[in-house]
Amino acid sequence: MMKNMGNADRIIRIILGAALITAGVVLQVNSGRFWWLALIGAVPFVTASLGTCPCTRS
């Protein structure tokens, strides 16, 4: 796959993904209802880790 992300985009996605994953895990432990936040956070985290976004065509 061709990389189609800049460094700033990757950093923002990693921070956003990590924050959502952390919030999902913490809130899941406290209330048991917010596991979906961790799943949503995994998407930007994985795309940033790979350096490519499948939604963007180059």
Image: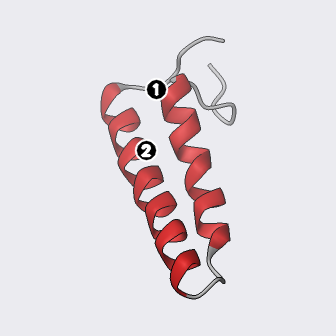
Three-letter amino acid code of the residue under disc 1: Met
**Residue 11's spot in the image, x, y percent?**
33, 38
Three-letter amino acid code of the residue under disc 2: Arg
In this view, the residue farthest toward the bottom is 31
In the displayed structure, would residue 12 be above or below residue 20? above
Q: Residue 42 vs residue 20: left or right?
A: right
Query: Mark 2 to mark 1: distance in Å?
Result: 10 Å
Quarter of the picture containing the N terminus is: top right
Measuring 57% from the left and 34% from the top, which residue is drawn there?
Answer: 47
Look at mark 1 in the image and give the residue it sits on.
Answer: 5
Give the crowd class for mark 2: few <14, some 14-19, many >=20 residues within 10 Å: many
Number of disc labels: 2
Q: Are marks 2 and 1 in contact (CB under 8 Å)?
A: yes
Q: Quadrant of residue 50?
A: top right
Q: Earlier in the sequence, mark 2 or mark 1?
A: 1
Look at mark 2 in the image and give the residue it sits on.
Answer: 13
